[in-house]
Amino acid sequence: MLIVANWKAYIEDLEKAGKLVAASKKLARATDNRIVLAPPAPFLGAFALKNTSRIAYAAQDVSATTGGAETGETTAQTYAASGATYAIVGHSERRAAGDTNTIVAEKLAHALACDLTPILCIGEKERDHDGQYLAFVREEMTAAFAALTPKERACVVIAYEPLWAIGKTAESAIGPNDLTEMVLYIRKVLSELLPGKSASRALVLYGGSVEPGNIRDLARATGIDGFLIGHASVDERTFAALVKELS
């Protein structure tokens, strides 16, 4: 399993960040799962630049630019130089802040050009009875992949992030059956976008609400390859419990 901890802007103290990193290193030594931390940008270099542990680091976002007179922007190359090996692209919160499919595609291309493994977030705002949400997810994927080469497409990790399931309890979030169907659909679309058998090897993560009580059921027999975890990842005990449930 690939477990990505997206700290968002919850951690604003370097000491607290250091404690979370230390706890994650212990978890990484006790599991075969791959742990990736996505701290706020100013903290990433402090921990990732001389990283020798089994954990990896991700940028929470990358700029749509490639440098120059762009005050406040942090480029994919800057993140790569700071020790990141992954980059989250197209997160729902960035899309809500104005990232269109076109901008997401640009960011995806920049991440790949700098040898960062992109974690492309996709997902519908709500479910409808007519299945329009499937067309919405397909459009997000096809728009993001349109300008990429077959080789580049095969490097992208997909994170399915249904907005309607975020922030919900386990009982109100997506169930194993619905998640299985969605993963199958995502792989169907990937089979149209990726060459040969690449679609079967592509990683698909789940980015909705998870708890220690439901993460194992969601991981078992649904076809997912890991999780993109938000708020729960900044609580040492909760995150440890989630990782241990998958070990």
Image (tube, rainbow, N blue to C red):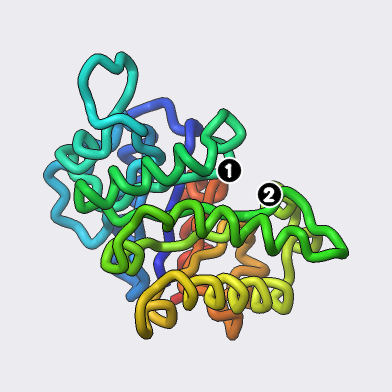
| Element on which disc 1 rests | helix
**Label for residue 163?**
2
Residue 183 placement (x, y as % from top left) = 59, 74
Alpha carbon of mark 1 to alpha carbon of mark 2: how far?
7 Å
Horizontal relation, residue 85 to residue 39: left or right: left
User: Callout 2, which amino acid?
Assistant: Leu
User: Who comes first in sequence, dot 1 or dot 2?
Assistant: 1
Residue 156, visible in the rendered structure:
yes
Residue 159 placement (x, y as % from top left) = 51, 59
Location of mark 1 (residue) = 92
Measured along the vertical axis of the image, is residue 135 above or below residue 198?
above
Camera-nearest residue between 26 and 144: 144
Camera-nearest residue between 48 and 69: 69
Residue name at image x 50 percent, y 63 percent: 227
Horizontal relation, residue 172 to residue 225: left or right: right
> Badge 2: how crowded within 10 Å, few (<14), some, or many (20+)?
some
